[in-house]
Amino acid sequence: MATLRQMEYLVTVVDTGSFTRAAELLHVTQPALSHQIRALEKSVGGRLLERLPRSVRLTPAGRAVLPHARAALADAGRLHSAARLTAGLDGGGLEIATVFSVSLGILPPVLRTWRRQHPGVQISLREYPHTDQLQAAMAAGQADLAIGPPPTGWDGPMRELGVEEFVLALPADDPAAATGGDTVALASLADRAWVHYAAGHGLADVLDQACAGEGFQPRAAVRVQQTAAAPLLAAAGLGPALLPANVLPPGFDGRVLRPDPPVRRPLIAYTRTRPDPLTTAFADLLGQQACLLPPHVRDLLTDRQSHDK
């Protein structure tokens, strides 16, 4: 059976691209390292590495095994961290993975409260542009807890956080904002150039799918990678922007309208295995404090309705 040490050796060889360098980092002899790699290959039933003149390359079997080796090492590290925390030796650490928009809109107030309650816990935050990348990272054991849209075919523990509402950001003098009410038909914006998102960004899919449901493909005036830039560019007149309500900044000086039909997506927190007490405590706080429609956005929509009456 493969051991954690053998998996550590495999990962180090791959990361360094060299048996010699890996042996130096691991403080073992190169023959001992090679022996352990061969033992691992025998255990899994096939070659994992191919030695090249100046580097090392993974075989197809190696590419299949490597993510599991990384995940096993990550789980072992969290096990030791949890044990130290239980023993009161240190504050431990918590690794959180999420998509860009969640780290911008939902997490800051939750992390602020968490920091006050658990000042000794070190937080590591990994951000991904797309939920598929988030799921892949979580499957590879790169975080304790993932926060985002529901992953596809996930068989680990999941916790519902609520439904995220999307809004449209527009310039204050946009004609669509003068029609009355707090909604605007997406189809009425079919001829507009939009503040769109970069290829591979999860919100690009959300916008494209919402518009496709109304029979058109949004034309991009500009594409952004940073979610926070979308409402600012929309207010500056580059085009409408569709974004989660919770990422709209306080003091936004443009118009905010609800799209018709509504655009929503569920958010969940999920783990690979049964979460430890530290991860559970964070998920509990997240469930209590995650704000999917912030008061300042609700006020903007309410003010709009009052203005139109």
Image (spheres, rainbow, N blue to C red):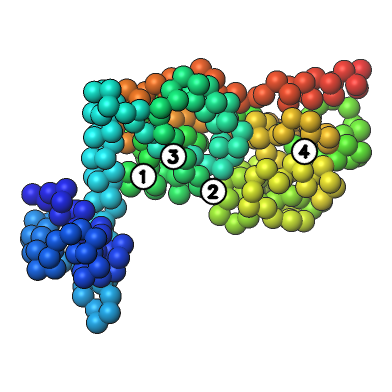
Residue at 64% x, 48% y: name it. Answer: 226
**Marks 2 and 3, how far apart at CA:** 17 Å
Where residue 164 appears, as percent x and y from the top left, is 59, 29
Q: Amino acid at mark 2?
A: Pro
Distance (Cα) linking label 1 and label 2? 16 Å
Rounded to the nearest angstrom, the CA distance separating label 1 from label 4 is 34 Å
The answer to whether residue 43 is left or right of residue 89 is: left
Dot in front, 1 or 3:
3
Q: Amino acid at mark 3?
A: Ser
State the mark number for residue 169. Answer: 4
Tell me the quarter of the picture where residue 250 sits: top right
Q: Which residue is mark 2?
A: 129
Tag shown at residue 124: 3
Image coordinates of residue 116 in percent, x first then y, are 50, 21
Bin the neighbour count of mark 2 within 10 Å (Cα to Cα): few under 14, some 14-19, many 20 and up: many
Against 98, is 86 above or below? Answer: above
Tell me, for residue 142, which label it has, or none.
1
Position of 35 relative to 299 (above/below): below
